[in-house]
Image: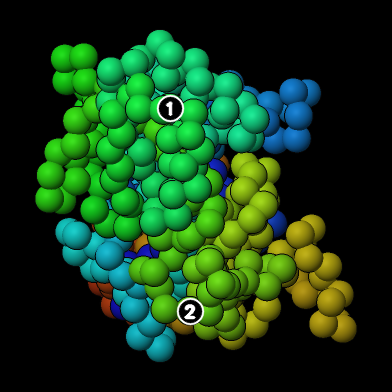
Amino acid sequence: MYDSDVIVIGGGPAGLSAAIRARRVRTYNLHSSSVMIVTNTSPGGLADWTKVRMTGDGWSHEKGEIIKKLMNDVEDYSIPVKKEKVLKVKDKGDTFTVVTDKGEYKSLAVIVATGMKMTWNEREHFGDRLFGTLKGYRFMEDYFEKLCEKEEGKTIVFVGTDKLDKTLKLFQKINKGRMDIKKVIDDGKNIQGYEKKDDEIVIATEKSRVHGDHILIDFESYQLKAITADLVDCEKDERGFIKTDKRCRVNDEGLFAAGDVTGPPFSIAKAVGEGTTAGLESYRYVYRRKFGEEAPVFAFYPIHQYGEPTYFKIPELEDHYRPKLLADFKTEDDKLVFRECELENNDKNLALLQLCDGKQTLGEIRKELGDVDKTIKKLIHGKDLTLEV
């Protein structure tokens, strides 16, 4: 028994895209997987800080727009979001255990989508007293000069990995002692958030509170050294980013990764694309684990890829499966209304929905309620129920 078929770590565009795709595959007769998102703060990631461009100005999204659209699907498909800090992912063989600061969760598959840096509440201050190394070093040289001239005598705090010295040296060369400089080295665990206090902005860390008039987040340093990938033991490149194949598989045992945590290029289009791929691949992996056969996920994959065509059918409802309700429903007169199906509002159906919690086996439910197969299949067709093992 476990908590979810798939656990997605990270709530940025890669993590949200992965969760949506793993949760809901529209192919006829394929039932959905149970999916959980675990993120240390409200979903959004770096893509929620400013306007983002998928390719260019012709395909771009204003601040917060793309995350709002992704979150609409997360909420529409009733994907639970746990706001907890992930400390470690443990491979237990048959399952994974995701350890957080509040508990532990088990799953058949894990998708790591933790980005290049752990985000907190930077979005609230970005563009005000908090900014980052964006648009290249020629732009930053001009920006630094204007800042030092305008804010002489003020304090600037540099935040980044232990690779931030290159940017810091550039600033020192331009600054010439006009602004006081502090730095906070982000190790992926020590920073706890930001707050505005009077005319200052404050960084809260595990050991202290660092005050400044301005904060610069050095994205260059995060691109030079990964600090969000150490929560999982797997193969990484020379900078610490997680290695994957082109299908976002870290290994063949249910571990996947997507987005900035896999290294350059760092792009929202890449994050969404890899998230989508990781979601589909995790779905296929879980399907094989649960039913012992390939999922016929047309049109994402050809249905003749293994010789004879695969058919869209619900697996036999065997006693050992554990039905798990995935969606909320509303009561309307004599109907229980889900997103894409309806049930009669009667005592048997209400009792069945209460028992479909992923803990009771189908055999146990049948002993208590009798034949429930028709209703179970109807909920699977509607993508509102899955079978866990």
Point 78% across, 23% down: residue: 58
Q: Residue 232: x and y, percent?
A: 40, 73
Q: Residue 222: x and y, percent?
A: 48, 51
Q: Residues within 10 Å of mark 2 (few under 14, many from 20)?
A: some
Residue that mark 1 sits on: 175
Q: Amino acid at mark 2?
A: Cys
Q: Quadrant of the C terminus?
A: bottom left
**Farthest residue toward the bottom?**
93
Q: Nearer the viewer, residue 199 or 228?
A: 199
Q: Residue 311: x and y, percent?
A: 75, 71
Q: Secondary structure at mark 2?
A: loop
Residue that mark 2 sits on: 234
Point 57% across, 80% down: residue: 251
- Res 336 quadrant in image: top left
The residues bearing labels 1 and 2 have C-alpha atoms spaced at a distance of 42 Å
Residue 97 is marked as: none
Q: Residues within 10 Å of mark 1 (few under 14, many from 20)?
A: some
